[in-house]
Image: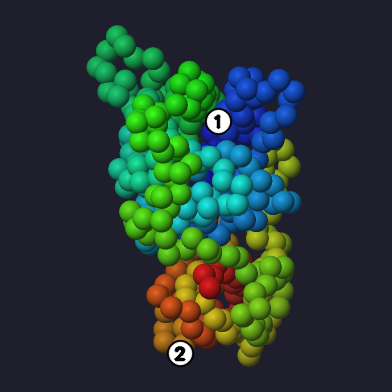
Amino acid sequence: GSITQGAGAAPINTECYAYKSYQLFQKRFSAKNNVKFIKAGVGGTPSELGMIRFDRDVLRDGQQPDIVVIEFAVNDEGDETEGDCYESLVRKVLNLPWKPAVILLFSVFANDWNLQDRLSPVGKLYDLPMVSVLDAVSPQFALKNDEGRVITKNQFFYDMFHPSNLGHTIMADCLSYFFERCEETKGLRKNKFVTGIFDEETLERRLLETPVIGNSFESVHLIDKKDSYVGAKIDEGGFVHCDKELQCVEIDDSLMTVPEFPHNWMYNGDSPENAYFEMKISCKALLLIFKDSGETNVGKADVWVDTEYCLCADPHINNWLHCNAVILFNEKETKEHIVRIEIPKEEREKCFTILGFGYVK
């Protein structure tokens, strides 16, 4: 989400917690400047969208990260699955062929709220390290006098949702403290020599157990104009244009912004007689990603699945420029579906952009 992107930090690329934690890790462990930094935070991203973005934005250009930090503790309140998407993403990363280490990070809002109670059972099941910023900073916020208080809320937070430069520094220090503890213990577990089971073997066994919330979307993939799927046949209808007015973010350590979902389908209002998009697809789960916007020339779209009305995709519910993912269906078995996205008659002079789809075979 936006905290990982670096919101509240100035400059956003080098004062964000992600970059600072990378620097601290490199200082502690690297002798040859051989640590590579990948940052894929995008404002407004819940795990519902993050699990679809992962392959493209984290594993881009064939990257094989050794350590992956996953943070959705303040962005997942609206997750329709209440944790299934989150656990699906965690399992997706853990099951990568090169077996990266995974750290679950729990950010916090200025009202001392996050979703770690919902998400931490995932970490417990797979025996993953969890770093809670809430546990680190919120208790001392509540102290009635300065005795014992290290930092005030006004110092830690830039606004209600995002940390300041100092807050980002403390988040990085929390991760660095975890790495320090790892180094001190040399990765040993108290019961390792009693049970004869090593951490990797334990994880393999846990991944075979029943998920604590769900793994419906563990094998989710992206469809857009660039990344196609042989099991999908698309009739673009009037969605023949490509939207260039997209949410743009700073990735890795760069200040240059990169557009999100540039290979999209856009209806721009110029063909009201052809205001539809239709896709025939074989899958068991499907998510629509569409562009949210605060602009007045952007309209709604009705979504139908197998001739049954599914939902209204309204770009103005959140009313700011970002990417919105919604579940169209999630079923037990793969079968063929016809998805039709149609602009209502009263909206056909306005624009609507399909950024992509996430599907599970």
Residue type at mark 2: give it: Thr
Residue 328 lies in quadrant: bottom left
Point 51% across, 49% down: residue: 94
- Tell me where residue 171 appears, x and y as whole percent: 48, 28
- Tell me where residue 116 appears, x and y as whole percent: 35, 41
**Distance (Cα) linking label 1 and label 2:** 47 Å
- Tell me where residue 159 appears, x and y as whole percent: 45, 34
- Label 2: how many residues lie within 10 Å, few (<14), some (14-19) or many (20+)? few
Mark earlier in primary sequence (1, 2): 1
* Count of numbered labels shown in the rendering: 2
| 210 or 190, nearer to the observer | 190
Point 57% across, 38% down: residue: 67
Q: Is residue 95 above or below residue 331?
A: above
Find residue 307 and name its label. 2
Whether residues under marks 1 and 2 lie with C-beta atoms below 8 angstroms apart, the answer is no
Find residue 251 and name its label. none
Would residue 119 appear left or right of 353 to someone viewing this image?
left
Residue type at mark 1: give it: Tyr
| 295 or 360, nearer to the observer | 360
Would residue 13 appear left or right of 202 to someone viewing this image?
right
Q: Mark 1 sits on what residue?
A: 17
Point 36% across, 55% down: residue: 209
